[in-house]
Image: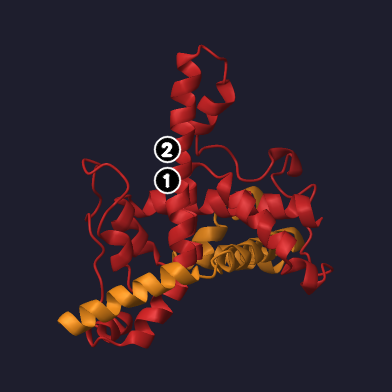
């Protein structure tokens, strides 16, 4: 497999969607290719950093409103 | 995790084609859901704390697209040449994820990427980098953005996203791959 093909399979690899034979070929290529290993590391880092964008505090008034609604539901049920 | 908060009222048209099932098929034993059913206030607070960020990001996706659409209509009405507005609305999801010039004739790297091992952790995880990632997500096509947010921000799995968006597994994978690759490219421009 070529590097150009490998980079297009990286998400499938990370998500475990490659067939066993394709996965074996992928890992064989990766083990001997610094560029593809670096690209995979970059993609994993990007995924990790995308996950970090989730951190956003709930505004206090909204949180209070939601908690009140929950308590109202709890009392009524 | 529970995705009920996402699945009650969809922001997309109700007549959207469905695949393979319009609703998410869930494990009947969902710890979050069970805790909520038993009226566990702490579980509810933890849930809204965890889901607020992803939900806001997703909501902004649709609101921003709506605003862009309204802008485009206004521009057309005023006969202004806002071509960029239209192209951003109908941006294609195709094309290579890596600049082809970075590969040689043998389709191997001629200009390989750096592994970022020399980037200090404080910079990698710093606010400026996260802001850069947020901007890169905002710049994705709407179809890529919703998948990236649901998968990598909200933490849903592939099946859940396919069910929520009524898209095929292959389509989900393509959108996710291209979305992540675009964010990677933006980070490469910033960090390298």
Q: Are marks 1 and 2 in contact (CB under 8 Å)?
A: yes
Q: Which chain is orange?
A: A
Read off the residue under disc 1.
Answer: B62
Do the residues at pointers 1 and 2 share their chain? yes
Residue B131 — which label?
Answer: none
Report helix, strand or loop for mark 1: helix
Query: The disc numbered 2 marks a residue on which chain?
Result: B
Report the residue at 48% width, 25% height from top.
B72
Calculate the distance from the C-alpha at mark 1 to the C-alpha at mark 2: 6 Å
- The residue closer to the viewer here, B116 or A55, is A55
**For mark 2, does the 10 Å Cα neighbourhood hold few (<14), some (14 to 19), or many (20 or more) residues?**
few
Question: In this figure, which colouring scheme has been used for the structure?
Answer: by chain
Read off the residue under disc 2.
Answer: B66
Q: Quadrant of residue A42?
A: bottom right
Residue A55 lies left or right of residue B154; in this view the side is right
Q: Residue furthest top?
A: B79
Vertical relation: B98 (above or below) A74: above
Residue A11 lies left or right of residue B30; in this view the side is right
Q: Quadrant of residue B69?
A: top left
Report the residue at 42% width, 53% height from top.
B59
**Color used for chain B?**
red
Residue B14 lies left or right of residue A44; in this view the side is left
Residue A77: image x %, image y %?
A: 15, 82
Report helix, strand or loop for mark 2: helix
Residue B62 lies left or right of residue A75; in this view the side is right
Query: The disc numbered 1 marks a residue on which chain?
Result: B
**For mark 1, does the 10 Å Cα neighbourhood hold few (<14), some (14 to 19), or many (20 or more) residues?**
some
- The residue closer to the viewer here, B85 or A23, is B85
| Residue B154 appearing in the image | no
């Amino acid at each position: 497999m070529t590097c150009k093909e490998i980079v297009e399979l990286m998400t499938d690899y990370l998500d475990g969607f490659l067939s066993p034979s394709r996965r074996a070929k992928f890992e064989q290529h990766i083990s001997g290719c610094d560029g593809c290993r670096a690209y995979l590391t970059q993609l994993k880092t990007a995924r990790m950093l995308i996950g970090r964008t989730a951190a956003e505090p709930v505004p206090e008034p909204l949180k209070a409103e939601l908690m009140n609604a929950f308590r109202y539901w709890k009392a009524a049920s | 995790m529970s995705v009920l908060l996402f699945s009650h009222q969809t922001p997309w048209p109700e007549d959207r084609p469905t695949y393979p099932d319009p609703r998410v098929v869930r494990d009947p034993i969902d710890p979050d859901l069970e805790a909520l059913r038993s009226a566990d206030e702490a579980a509810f607070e933890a849930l809204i704390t965890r889901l607020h960020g992803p939900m806001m990001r997703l909501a902004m996706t649709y609101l921003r697209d709506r605003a862009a659409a309204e802008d485009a209509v206004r521009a057309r009405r005023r006969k202004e040449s806002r071509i960029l507005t239209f192209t951003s609305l109908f941006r294609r999801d195709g094309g290579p994820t890596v600049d082809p010039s970075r590969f040689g004739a043998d389709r191997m790297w001629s200009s390989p990427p750096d592994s970022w091992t020399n980037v200090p952790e404080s910079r990698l995880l710093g606010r400026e980098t996260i802001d850069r990632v947020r901007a890169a997500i905002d710049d994705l096509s709407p179809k890529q953005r919703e998948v990236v947010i649901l998968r990598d921000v909200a933490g849903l799995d592939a099946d859940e996203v396919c069910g929520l968006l009524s898209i095929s597994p292959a389509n989900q994978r393509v959108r996710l791959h291209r979305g992540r690759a675009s964010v990677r490219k933006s980070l490469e421009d910033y960090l390298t």
